[in-house]
Amino acid sequence: MNFSKRPSAMLLPKVSLSRPWTLAALALGLVLPLLGGGSAHASGKAAPIGGVAVANFTTFNDADLSFYLAKTLSPELRQVIRERKLSVVARTATFDTVGACFASVGLAEMAPAGRSPRQPAFTLDSYRTSAVQDFDGAACSVAVLESAVATLNDTSIAKVLGGIEKTALTGGSRESELVANPKTARIASNIGQTYDDSPLFDQLHNFRIGEAVAHRYVATSVWSRSTRLDSGRLMCVAQAGFTARPPQERNFRLPTIWQNFVSLQDEGSLADCEQQAAIGAVRNLMKEPWVGKGGSMTNIARTREDGIPLPDLKRVAAVENQLVAETQARQQVVASRNTQTNRVSCTNQCSNGACLRTFSDGRQERWQAPRVYNSFKQDWEWNTSSCGG
């Protein structure tokens, strides 16, 4: 393929859940770091003459991808896409610092300009890793996308169309309206493995998302997939974003901005690996800006649903600003403690909490540092800044 690049992007979701507020501390596992989220702006346009309609969440040019699909997909599949007014929803992601990439393709009802399509009910996914020093993100993206499209082409049309009604832009029913509750959050999940989602809700509640948006109207979308590579290594990818609550019997519209996370593990279960990737994606979504330029909710209107109000972005900004102020206050307290420690003129040398304290007069003493919970980092750490007293 000879695609020209465009900004990186991705997609998301499906079933909705709600859970009461909880402030349980979350101890995060060892997961490889996120390599950037992306803004998704699928055109939803009709296919160019000779091309195939695409909802493009990849690093490639719309027209080039459309014509590539027209050359690659079987005449029967192209006819189904055209007659049923569907589009090929395609996405890619690269994780340069760990030498990994991912692609996924599926079909969904074609969305009009200015609206996001829904998450496909059936997708074909492709994964690849290499040594970091040898990793070529562009070449990797081409390889996994070609692989996913080839698998799509080889899969029976009946299977590819399984659940296609969930991508319809209209229809569906509305569940009974729940009472407003700022201590409740909603997650829309479309996952490959079954895992405990409590840590995901912990992330939402720790960042008070229920105060920022009404769970009756807005959901946090979580999409995750996992595979065991030929090497035996586990690769798990997750994306998280904000989307409007859809009707029942319909998948969520794809967020326009989300956060991606990859987890590569040498051992363990696919479920645990996928859960860690999902936790990472949600955590990064919470920490990145919600409003303003590049904010995760800035273009949430593209996911709007009939009869569902959009979030009040002023309210979202107020909660976000309060969280930022609280974080800055905590940092000032830490800085103040460090200043006081310096006035006492001592130094600490520590290893896993076992410390040797040396005072300015040369006197030394051994002491055990206490473990404290850092609510901002959401993790336990050793407090080694004390000079005693």
Image (spheres, grey):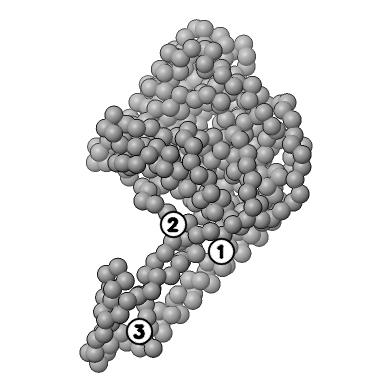
Q: CB atoms at circles 3 and 2 under 8 Å apart? A: no
Q: Name the residue under label 3.
A: 387
**Residue found at the far bottom of this picture:** 361
The kind of residue on which mark 2 rests is Ala
Q: Nearer the viewer, mark 1 or mark 3?
A: 3
- Which part of the image, by quadrant, shows the N terminus? top left
Q: Quadrant of residue 355?
A: bottom left
Q: Name the residue under label 1.
A: 324
Instruction: Specify which label sits upstream in the sequence, 2 or 1.
Output: 2
Q: Mark 2 points at which residue?
A: 27
As drawn, the label of residue 65 is: none
Q: In this view, does 13 lie to the left or right of 112?
A: left
Q: Which residue: 52% across, 69% down?
A: 328
Picture layout, residue 388 above or below residue 207: below
Q: Which residue: 67% across, 39% down?
A: 245
How far separated are the C-alphas under marks 1 and 3?
Answer: 30 Å
Residue 96 in sight from this viewpoint: no
Instruction: Specify which label sits upstream in the sequence, 1 or 3.
Output: 1
Q: Nearer the viewer, mark 3 or mark 2?
A: 2
How far separated are the C-alphas under marks 3 and 2?
Answer: 28 Å
